[in-house]
Image (cartoon, rainbow, N blue to C red):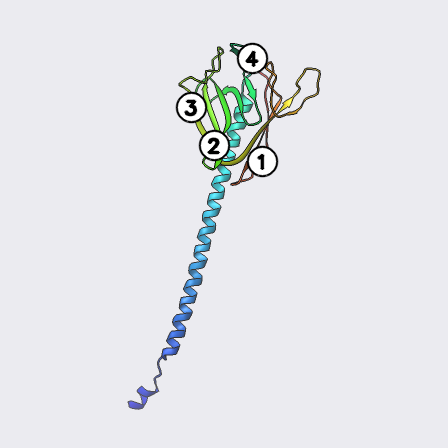
Amino acid sequence: MVERLSSQRGFTLLEMLVAMTLMAVILVLLYSGMRLGARSWEASTARAETVNDLRLVQDFIRRQLRQSATVYYNDPDEGRLVAFVGEDNELRMVTPMLAYLGFGGLYWVHYDVVADGDAQALRLRWWPYQPDGEREADPDVEESLLLRGIDDVRFSYFGAEELHEDPQWQDRWEDSRLRPELVRLSLDWAQADWPELVVGLVSN
């Protein structure tokens, strides 16, 4: 009996330490891999959400430009003017708002750039259209920030300054009688690449 017991050999302390060390290394590697996978998943999800937000904003602006109306308003100093004002960093026009949000009828919409902390934001303001004026001081003016953290916004307009001239791209639209043929929106945004947006305005 004594000989049988003495022939059974257990693990030595050194072997136990080596096994525990190997197990700890394997667990660390597994945890690091899982953590890296989780971070990659979070980054991919955030990227997808950013791209989706970008697509929604582009679709919204494209739809508003295409549906914008050739209407007029009465300026107290200059008389009857087309309801379209285009600058290099802002755009004002008349277009239908989204009916399912409860905004029926025509509205002035105003895109511009405002300070947003250390960066800038693309802002949308809207208020009911009235032929007797722009009514920017109207209490019904509402606003929303469409994109935050942007670096630069540039609007440009394609059309002829005079009837006999060839159309070309311009940084601002100064014709108070007609709207441009095309509107282009370029935007620098660190979170995602903004594909240049060019939209044709429908004559109506």
Tell me the amino acid under the disc marked 3: Glu
Tell me the amino acid under the disc marked 2: Ala
User: Which callout, 3 or 2, points at the residue further toward the start of the chain?
Assistant: 2
Tell me the amino acid under the disc marked 1: Pro
Residue topped by disc 3: 142
Report helix, strand or loop for mark 3: strand
How far is disc 3 from disc 2 in space, using C-alphas? 17 Å
Residue topped by disc 1: 195
Q: How many residues crowd around disc 3 within 10 Å: few (fewer than 14), some, or many (20 or more)? A: few
Residues at circles 1 and 2 in contact by the CB criterion of under 8 Å: no
Nearer to us of marks 3 and 2 is: 2
Nearer to us of marks 1 and 4 is: 4
- The numbered dot on residue 81 is 4
Nearer-the-camera pick, 82 or 136: 136
Residue 71 percent across, percent down from the top left = 54, 14
How far is disc 1 from disc 4 in space, using C-alphas? 32 Å
Residue 117 percent across, percent down from the top left = 45, 36
Is 64 left or right of 162, judged from the image as shown?
left
118 up-or-down from 67: above or below: below
Q: How many residues crowd around disc 4 within 10 Å: few (fewer than 14), some, or many (20 or more)? A: some
Nearer-the-camera pick, 166 or 37: 166
77 up-or-down from 107: above or below: above
User: Which callout, 3 or 1, points at the residue further toward the start of the chain?
Assistant: 3
Tell me the amino acid under the disc marked 4: Leu
Residue topped by disc 2: 115
Q: How many residues crowd around disc 1 within 10 Å: few (fewer than 14), some, or many (20 or more)? A: few
Report helix, strand or loop for mark 4: strand
